[in-house]
Amino acid sequence: MTTVAEKPIRSSVVSECARYRYLLTEDWGPGDRSITWVMLNPPGNATVEDETTRHVGSFSRHWGYDRLAIVNLFAFQALEPEQLSGVEDPVGPKNRWFVHQAVTSAELVVVGWGDGLLSAGSRPKTLDDLVELRRANAAMLCFGLTTAGNPLHPARIPESMIPVVWTAR
């Protein structure tokens, strides 16, 4: 029988200026099965668990993963995507590297940023990188697409929903 920790061990990589969160990880199992979630932007606090983190953690544990990594197209910590448009560099100087590492080291990658990207400004290089990684590697999954064609954000998706292959645009 596999033992799952009640409280995950959480860590994050935040920039020296504390404006960017590049990576959030949670470990709760004894194994090394890893899942990466790619979303839009981290919330305003790198250490506080939010609804989205709880939700993707629940999916990850339910699917049998021992560790999750969360990276974002934009690393700037903002409570609302609209706040990204007023930031000089919402992606962050090291974000592309962290996204690449998290995506290429995971057993499974699930994407979901919703339509917030449309209000966040121009298409980030991290999205172009992700599309290239998807073409070069195994498929990435999502929970379907918004009417604008973006992968649905996982925060309000029922746990019974089955992800599908993401077709990058």
Image (spheres, rainbow, N blue to C red):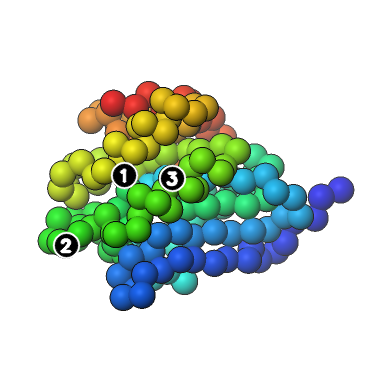
Q: Are marks 2 and 3 in contact (CB under 8 Å)?
A: no
Q: Tag 3: residue type?
A: His
Residue position for label 2: 87
Observer able to see residue 114: no
Observer able to see residue 5: yes
Q: For residue 111, what is the image quadrant?
A: top left
Mark 1 surroundings: few (<14), some (14-19) or many (≥20) residues within 10 A? many
- Which of the two discs, 2 and 1, labels the residue nearer the N terminus? 2
Nearer the viewer's eye, disc 2 or disc 1? 1
The residue located at (81%, 50%) in the rendering is 2
The residue located at (72%, 55%) in the rendering is 29
Q: Position of residue 68 (x, y in %)?
A: 57, 51
Q: Are marks 3 and 1 in contact (CB under 8 Å)?
A: no
Q: Report how far apart the C-alphas of labels 3 and 1 lie in the structure.
A: 9 Å
Q: Are marks 2 and 1 in contact (CB under 8 Å)?
A: no
In the picture, measured across the screen, residue 94 lies left or right of residue 57, that is: left
Position of the C terminus by quadrant: top left
Mark 3 surroundings: few (<14), some (14-19) or many (≥20) residues within 10 A? some
- Helix, strand or loop at disc 1? helix
- Which of the two discs, 2 and 3, labels the residue nearer the N terminus? 2
Residue position for label 1: 126
Foreground pick, 105 / 58: 105
* Residue 100, disc: 3
- Which of the two discs, 3 and 1, labels the residue nearer the N terminus? 3
